[in-house]
Amino acid sequence: MKNLLKQAAIIGGLEAISALRLGKLMPAAAGRGLIFTLHHVRPRTPQAFEPNGHLEVTPEFLQAVVEECLAAGLTPIALEDLPHRLADPGDRRRFVAFTLDDGYRNNRVHAAPIFRRHAIPYTIFVTPGFVDRKVTLWWETAGALLNRVDRLEIDLGKGRERLPAESHAQKVDAFNRLCAAVNGGDQTRVTERLDEAALRAGVDPTGIVDREVMTETELRELAEQDPLVRYGGHTLTHPVLSRVPEAQLSHEIEASMEMAGRYGGRKATCLAYPYGTACSVGTREFDAATKAGVSLAVTTRPGVLTAETMKRPTAVSRVSLNGLYQKRRYVGALISGIPFRLKG
Ligand SMILES: [Zn+2]
């Protein structure tokens, strides 16, 4: 219910901003443009339970977003070029950078052709653990599993417990319980237990990674074929970084930057923190990225680019293209920057 109310408030805000054309009244709120976050880009295949629905948009919506950005006068830019462009006092343009997290194959199939058509650079943030099939996508596994079972037996650190998952509401509760366990504890252990439960129910977690995430060969091919693509680091194993011990933190960042450079055949300079929320990354992680030589690192904290952005280049906000709000008229509201000012 809380989520529903929150969604209604967001939609209400986007509708109001778009209907009242508030962007025209508050042009300063738009700042210097924005960085979009995407995950999956693919045609819709509806499922009964879609806990990850916010993480996918259709190619048609991405096309509409691109058109709206160009119509609004935003200049497309590669993320890695933002630091020096924003630092140039003689350059007053507003920019848009497109970023895609996790390295999904559908990025190549469905997003790349749209970017190519408009000569728009884009950055894919890769997690070598996914590329090498050593780490599974726990949220995808959980979604597939909960679509299949009507109860889930799993040890989330306090002994074996039974999570009912018969009704939609129960599935939502079970999914939220898994999220809380990942955020609050040992993601590796929770993922292992979840993978075991999935295999028992006939869901193959590694098969999901195989189906969804590009291999090293595919990443190298894309980089060779498409001069518009850049790769950035997304950590080695996609952990909640705030839970990672100090000694492991720099390795998570540095190894992913190095591998992203290898896949792309050029040095990677940008990083996206996994999850990227206020509770999963903070000052310690921003400092670790700076120490690792990252020139720009992005969170998923919502916000547009401003004159202040490059004062903290390893803590840069983005705007998520949320699969739950795929309306062309919302795009102008996002570009206006007003939703992020209202939140304070
Ligand atoms: Zn991610």
Image (cartoon, rainbow, N blue to C red):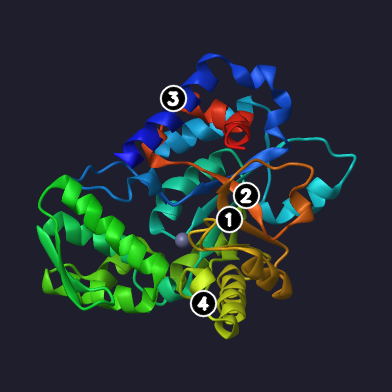
Q: Secondary structure at mark 1?
A: strand
Q: Residue at x 31, y 68 (%)?
A: 210
Q: Which residue is mark 3?
A: 12
Q: At label 3, which amino acid type do we have?
A: Gly
Give the CA separation, mark 2 to mark 4.
Answer: 22 Å
Q: At label 1, which amino acid type do we have?
A: Thr
In the picture, the quarter occupied by the C terminus is: top right
Q: Residue at x 49, y 57 (%)?
A: 101
What crowding class fits label 2: few (fewer than 14 Cα within 10 Å), some (14-19), or many (20 or more)? many
What crowding class fits label 3: few (fewer than 14 Cα within 10 Å), some (14-19), or many (20 or more)? few
- In depth, the one of 219 and 304 nearer the eye is 304
Q: Confirm whether residue 242 shows in the render.
A: yes
- In depth, the one of 162 and 215 nearer the eye is 162
Q: Which residue is mark 1?
A: 299
Give the CA separation, mark 4 to mark 1.
Answer: 17 Å
Asked if the residue under mark 1 is in contact with the one under mark 2, i.e. CB atoms within 8 Å, the reply is yes
Query: Which quadrant of the view contains residue 147?
Result: bottom left
Q: Is mark 1 within 8 Å of ligand 1?
A: no
Q: Which residue is mark 2?
A: 317
Q: At label 2, which amino acid type do we have?
A: Ser
Q: Secondary structure at mark 2?
A: strand
Q: Which residue is mark 4?
A: 244
Q: At label 4, which amino acid type do we have?
A: Val
**Among the two numbered marks 3 and 4 on one chain, the one whose residue lies closer to the N terminus:** 3
Is residue 182 toward the left or the right of residue 96 in the image? left
Q: Is mark 3 within 8 Å of ligand 1?
A: no
The single residue placed furthest to the top in the displayed view is: 20
What crowding class fits label 1: few (fewer than 14 Cα within 10 Å), some (14-19), or many (20 or more)? many
Q: Residue at x 48, y 35 (%)?
A: 63
